[in-house]
Image (cartoon, rainbow, N blue to C red):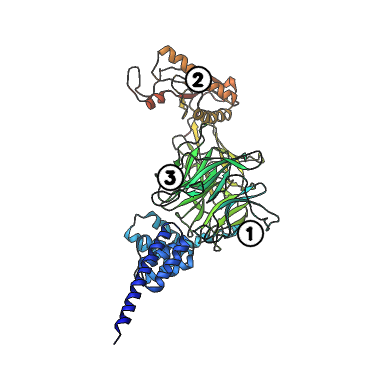
Amino acid sequence: MMRPERIWIMATATIVLTGCTATRIQLADQAYDLMQYPRAERLYEKVLAHREDRTVRARLADAYRRHNAWDESLKHYRILHGARPLSGDTALHFGEVLRAAGEQDEAADLILHVLQQTPEDRYAMDLFSSTQGYRSFYEDSARFFVNRINIPGVATAIAGIPYKDGLLFVGEKEADVRSGNPWNGNSFMDLYHTTSKTEVTWLPAQLIRGKVNGAFHEGPATISPDGRTLYFTRSNYAHRKLLKDERNTSQLMLFRAHLDSTGAWNDLHAFKYNGDHWSTGHPALSTDGRTLYFASDRPGGFGGSDIWLCRDNGNGWSEPENLGAVINTPGNEVFPTINGNTLHFASTGHLNMGGLDIFETQLIDGKWTDPVNLLAPINSPKDDLHFVMDSTGKAGFLSSDRDGSDQIYAFTLYEPLFDLLGLAMDDEGNYLADVTLTLTDRSTEEDLSTLSGPNGAFTFKLKPNRDYILRGTRDDMLTTSQHVSTKGLTRLDSVLAPLRLTRLRLGEAIAINNIYYDYDSWEIRYDAALELDKLARLFIENPKMSFELGSHTDSRGGDLYNLVLSDARANAAVNYLIQRGVDPDRITAKGYGEDRLVNGCSNGVHCTEAEHQANRRTEFTVTGVASIAETHSRP
C-alpha cells in the first residue's frame, strides 16, 4: 500500500506541474500574439513534452509556419491531422506547408475537402488550382539563371534596388536574442548599401547615412527618379518606443526622406495616409515618379494586404486607390516594384508555387492584365518576393527564403522573342480588314508593316526590352497609334494590342473624352491637357485632313457671354494643339455657346454640377480631306 505522505507529494507535484503548464501556455500565447514566434515555439514545445494538447500543437504548427520553419511546421500538422482530420483555415495552412514541402497531391486532397465545405472560398480555389498546374511552373525554367549573392556583414538581406553602382537593401545582423528582433533573434531591419567588387563578391554592408535607421524596423524602400527622395517603410515608433494599437500590434508606416548636401538622408516626413489601425509600406514609384504604389491592409481591400496607389496631383498625393480584384486576392499582395511598363508584386494568391510568388502585370487601356506567374527558377515553393530589373532590362535581383533564410539573388534573363497579337476595330467594335499596320522600333526607327486580316487580326514579332509605336491606317479611317513595350516583360508570352480606329465622317462632330473646363473658365486643366496631347498626335498623324475644334458651355450665364466664353475655350484648346506641333493652317476654333446641349439642362432647369459639366465640352470635326472629296463606304 502506498504511504499517505507519498500520495500527498505526488498530488502536490501534479498541482505544481499543472500550474507550470498553464503559465507556460499563457506566456506562449502572449508571445504568439506579439509575433515573438521563436519564444512561443520554445514554450509550446515544453508544454507538449509533458502532455498532449491539440490547441497548443495547432498554435505551435502555425508559429513554425509563420516563422518559415517549414519542416517543423509540417511535423506538427501531420500529428494533428493524423489524430483528427483538419478543416477550415487550419487545413488550408497545412496545405500551404505541404506545398512548400513539394507534396502537391496530398495538399490537393486536403484543399479539395475544404472547397467541398466552402466552394466560394477564392483563396482555397487558387491553392487548389496551383496544385493541379504545378508541373507547368517548371516549363520555362531555362529562361533565367539565378544565383545567390553573399553580402558580408549581414545575416539576411531582402528588397535590393540598384543604387550608386551597388544595392540599397534591407538587412539584419546577428544579434543577442535578448536585444534583437523577437521574430527571429536577429537585429531589427535597417537600410544598408553595398557595392559589387567582382561579379560574385560584394563589399561589406554599410548603414545608409542620416536619420532613416532607428531603433526598430526600416525598409523596404524606393528612390525617386532624380535620386533625391527616399520613400521607406518603418515600424510605428517614437522616441525609441514601439507604438501599438488596442490589439497590441505595431503597424508599419511609410515615410519620406530627402538627400542633403552631405549625402545623408534627413528631413523625414510621414506619409499622410498612414493609419494607426493598418499597415502601409513597401513603396514603389512609377518611372516618371508621379505614381506611388504601396502595400497596405487598410479598410476597403480584398483581404490581407493589397496593392494600392496614389497619384501626384500637383499638390501632393491623391487619395489611395486599390488596384482591384484582378491583382488583389483574399491572400496577401506585397512588395510592388515597377520595371519599365510592368508592375511586379508578390502574392500568396493566384496560381502560385507556394508561399509568396512573384507576378507581373501591365496597365493596358486603363486596365490591369491578368497577373502572370514568373515560374521557376524565379519562384520556388518557399517565399519569393521583391523582383527588380537593372537598367539593361536583362538582369536584376530578387529576394527569397528558398535556402532557409531571406537572401538576395541575382538573375540573368535569356532574351526571348514576344508575339504581338493585334486586333483592328472601329470605334463601334467592328473588325476592320485591310488596315495597314506599321510597327516602329523606337531605338532603331526601323519599320515593319503588315495588313489586318478579314477578322481584323494581325501579328508582329517583338524584341525584348524595346519600345515600339504601332500605327494603323486606312483611307476611310483616322490614322491612330499607340505605344507598345516589352520593357520589364520577363515571361515568354504574347503582348495584346487592340487598336481602335475612328471612322472618317466629314462634318460630323466627334466628342473628345475628358476635355472639360471649370465653371466660368477657359484655362486648360491638367486632365484636359492629357487628352489634348492625344488629340495633337491624332492630328499630326493625319496630315491631309483639316479640323474644326468646337467648344460648348452649359446654360448658366447669359447667351452672349456663353458664346464669348466658348469661343475663348476653343481658341485656348487650338493654341495648345499648335504649341504641340499641329499645323495652324489645318485647324480652326469655333465657340457654340449653349446652343448644343447634350442633356436637358437648359435655362431654368435644375441640374447637378456633373450634368452641367457634361455640357462644358470640346469636340472636333473633320472639315476636309486633301486626297478625297468624300468618305468611302467600305465596311
Q: Nearer the viewer, residue 175 or 385?
A: 175
Q: Nearer the viewer, residue 365 or 234?
A: 234
Residue 120 shows up from this direction: yes
- Estimate how packed mark 2 is, as few (under 14), some (14 to 19) or many (20 or more) residues with alpha carbons within 10 Å: many
| Residue 629 % position (x, y) | 53, 23
Say whether disc 2 or disc 1 marks the residue closer to the N-terminus. Answer: 1
| Residue 65 % position (x, y) | 45, 62
Circle on res. 276: 3
What's the residue at 69%, 56% (across, down)?
A: 199
Q: Do residues under tags 3 and 1 come within 8 Å of each other at their CB atoms? A: no
Give the position of the N terminus as an image quadrant: bottom left
Say whether disc 3 or disc 1 marks the residue closer to the N-terminus. Answer: 1
Q: How many marks?
A: 3
In front: label 2 or label 3: 3
- Compared with 165, 438 (above or below) is above
Q: Do residues under tags 2 and 3 come within 8 Å of each other at their CB atoms? A: no
Q: Do residues under tags 2 and 1 come within 8 Å of each other at their CB atoms? A: no
What's the residue at 43%, 17% (across, down)?
A: 593
User: Which quarter of the figure has residue 175?
Assistant: bottom right
Say whether disc 2 or disc 3 marks the residue closer to the N-terminus. Answer: 3
| Residue 383 % position (x, y) | 51, 58
Circle 1 residue: 150
In front: label 3 or label 1: 3
Residue 417 shows up from this direction: no
- Compared with 27, 612 (above or below) is above
- Compared with 103, 10 (above or below) is below
- SS of the residue at dot 3? loop
- Estimate how packed mark 1 is, as few (under 14), some (14 to 19) or many (20 or more) residues with alpha carbons within 10 Å: some
Amino acid type indicated by mark 2: Ala
Circle 2 residue: 570
In front: label 2 or label 1: 1
| Residue 167 % position (x, y) | 63, 50
